[in-house]
Amino acid sequence: MTIQALPFVILLGFLFGSTLIASRFGIGQFEPTNYIALRLALASALHLSIYLLGRPRRPWPRDPGLWKHAAVLGVFGTAVPMTAIVSSLQYQSAGLTSLLLTAGPAITVLMAHVSLPEERLTPRRGLGVTLALGGALLLAARGESGLPDVGQASPLGYGLVLLALLTGSATIVYARRFMRDYDFFDVASARVLVATLAVAPLSTLAVGVDLRGVDAQGYLALGYAALSGTFSALIVEFYIIRRFGSTAASMPTYVIPVVATLGGTLLLGEHVTPGMLAGIALILAGIGLVNQPD
């Protein structure tokens, strides 16, 4: 990763980390799939407003190739991982979820090795990947939850994060391979719109829509998550993928735990345990090896 990518990596890590905190609060009032559907719908509305009201006006993307690839990103890179991550917050803290997500770059490196000739895996990187995944397994084996009122985490929370890691890493590599030449705002807009069309009908059919228990703070959390973690973050993420590569795009996962753990502890009363610290130490040691220059 080049030094030029660092400001974008830090910005994206902050956007995603602070959104985890907002989402942890939000699902206390929203049903998780309703929360995701509304968050995506608000972000889609923001994107559409740029095309309709921006000066100068942006032309609506009409390239069939862009929409084909954006559909893949929308479903497997946005709808599936976003729903999985938000749903995992029912069973564990924002801090723990963010720590588990730090295994993402190791998975991305493995997938990039198979799919991208310019990002091959070396023996040193292989050792780093092993350490990073070992740290994530340590967290799962200890059954950490990070919640003050939960002694043992549900395995479902870990499974949901794993699903998000696999689909998110795969689509980072996919975008790097097939979408380098597309405009980053057009891709983000099409991606969010596809994700909205995928999640909203399924959520309505599966659980309905009941917002009677939502107060002003809940709507504020939803609005922040839509603006920062969906509208802004997905634009920045694709920009990083296109300009700096798939490995750089996975690096914000090391900023996310700092933001989510500190914010979760200060604002939501979440806990940080010695086991969580040991797991993150292994993960960071592994990623340090992965990112050393060859």
Image (cartoon, rainbow, N blue to C red):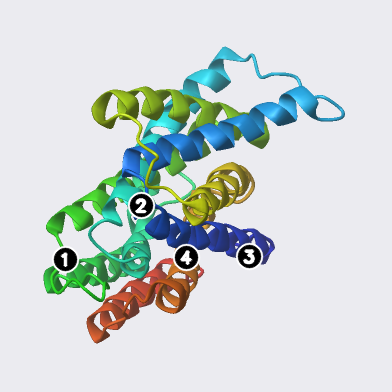
Q: Earlier in the sequence, mark 4 or mark 3?
A: 3
Nearer the camera: disc 2 or disc 3: 2
Mark 3 nearby-residue class (10 Å; few <14, some 14–19, many ≥20): some
Asked whether 140 or 174 is in front, the reply is: 140
Q: Give the total number of marks visible in the rendering.
A: 4
In-image side of 200 versus 134 (left or right): right
Residue to which mark 3 is pinned: 6
Nearer the camera: disc 1 or disc 2: 2
Kind of element beneath mark 2 = loop
Tags 1 and 4 touching, CB below 8 Å: no
Kind of element beneath mark 3 = helix
Q: Is residue 163 visible?
A: yes
In-image side of 152 versus 65 (left or right): left
Nearer the camera: disc 1 or disc 4: 1
Residue to which mark 4 is pinned: 256
Amino acid identity at mark 3: Leu
Mark 4 nearby-residue class (10 Å; few <14, some 14–19, many ≥20): many
Tell me the distance, in whole angstroms, between the alpha carbons under discs 1 and 4.
21 Å
Residue 78, percent across and down? 43, 38
Kind of element beneath mark 1 = loop
Question: What numbered label is drawn on residue 27?
Answer: 2
Asked whether 111 or 18 is in front, the reply is: 18
Tell me the distance, in whole angstroms, between the alpha carbons under discs 2 and 3.
31 Å
Residue to which mark 1 is pinned: 153
Amino acid identity at mark 1: Ala
> Is 271 rendered above or below residue 83?
below
Tell me the distance, in whole angstroms, between the alpha carbons under discs 2 and 4.
19 Å
